[in-house]
Amino acid sequence: MTLDDVADELYGLDPGEFVEARTAQVTAARENKDRALATEIGKLRKPTVVGWLVNLLARELPDEIGALLTLGDALRDAQRHLSGPDLRRLNTQRQQVVRALARKAGELAAERGRTVGEDALRDVGQTLHAALADAETAEQVRRGRVVTAASYSGFGPAGLAVVQGKSVKSEPAATPPAEKPGKKSKKKSAERDRDAERAAAEAELADVMSQADEVRGELNDARTELEQARSTLRAIDHRIEELRAELEHAEQERQFTRNSEKAAAEAVHRGERDLDAAERRVDEARRAVDDLG
């Protein structure tokens, strides 16, 4: 198995499975006496959630990612030739495609039981924009080897923290030259083991630091959401108080109107009774006139 094969497997995993799987691959390489490969595997960094999402897109939607990166080639060509109309048209197309892919990343994560926030999806979009701005970065995205989110300013060369190309070439890892048995050989073997262990420890440190940054970012997001929720709650409580006051006023008006209705009903009843009496008197007066001829 080559480093390229191992990287393909590891960077297709959920971030929560990465460290254990990497350790298993390092152990397997050592058991196969391939210390150089073990060292290189130990250097592979655990991807953040954003890196995993971009890698997921590269694996699940290679055609769409390929089309997007081809668009990046067209954008760079338009920029070199200062083609304003082409740049405007391609930039519009870029925004639409990137937004659609970012949404799709969220859907792919949901299919795997992971819920990702809007901030993560925005970072996915920024990483895709960065890939469009730089051919080397685009290749890393195409291969699904992204470690963490990238950002860019304008449209031009952009950096991206990914697995370096030299660490994921498809050629088999070089086998160290055979050495004569003896103290010198044993010493070099021990040094290689220490180098592999140190590389694995450094990668683990990078993973832990990355996780800490991720947790710190999630904490900041949670604090922002908490403050927004509290602000909304205060506004709702204020509105409830206003509605209660309006309800109390409405109930008072209702009682007043009910009293008015009762008084009006009584007035109607009296009026109908008085009208009946008046109509009877009219009939009596008419008969008296008729009797007088």
Image (cartoon, rainbow, N blue to C red):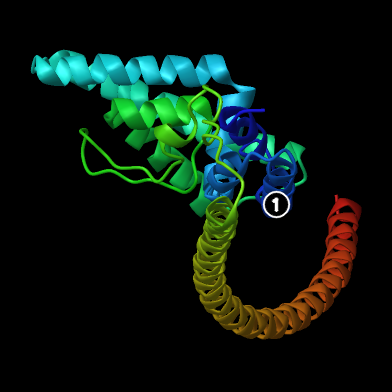
Indicate left or right for 20 with 75 as reference. Answer: right
| 281 w.r.t. 33: above or below | below
Q: Say which of 173 and 218 sits in front.
A: 173
List x then y, in percent, for residue 268. 80, 70
Q: Quadrant of residue 162?
A: top left
Q: How many marks?
A: 1
Q: Nearer the viewer, residue 104 or 277?
A: 104
Mark 1 = which residue? 23
Residue shown at 39% from the left, 20% from the top: 69
Which amino acid does the dot numbered 1 rest on? Thr
Image quadrant holding the N terminus, namely top right
Name the spot of residue 117 as percent of width and height, x first.
58, 53
64 on left or right of 1: left
Q: Nearer the viewer, residue 211 or 274?
A: 211
Identify the residue at image location x=57%, y=29%.
4
User: Which residue occupies the foreground of this view, 43 or 27?
Assistant: 27
* Horizontal and vertical percent position of residue 131: 36, 32
Query: In the image, residue 32 lies at what x, y percent?
Result: 72, 38
Above/below status of 255 relative to 47: below
Residue at (55% x, 32% y) in the render: 175
> Neighbour class for label 1 at 10 Å: few (<14), some, many (≥20)?
some
Is 110 situated above or below 8? Answer: below
Q: Is residue 285 left or right of residue 189?
A: right
Q: Is residue 104 visible?
A: no
Residue at position x 61%, y 38% from top? 11
**Would you place residue 68 above or below residue 149 in this image?**
above
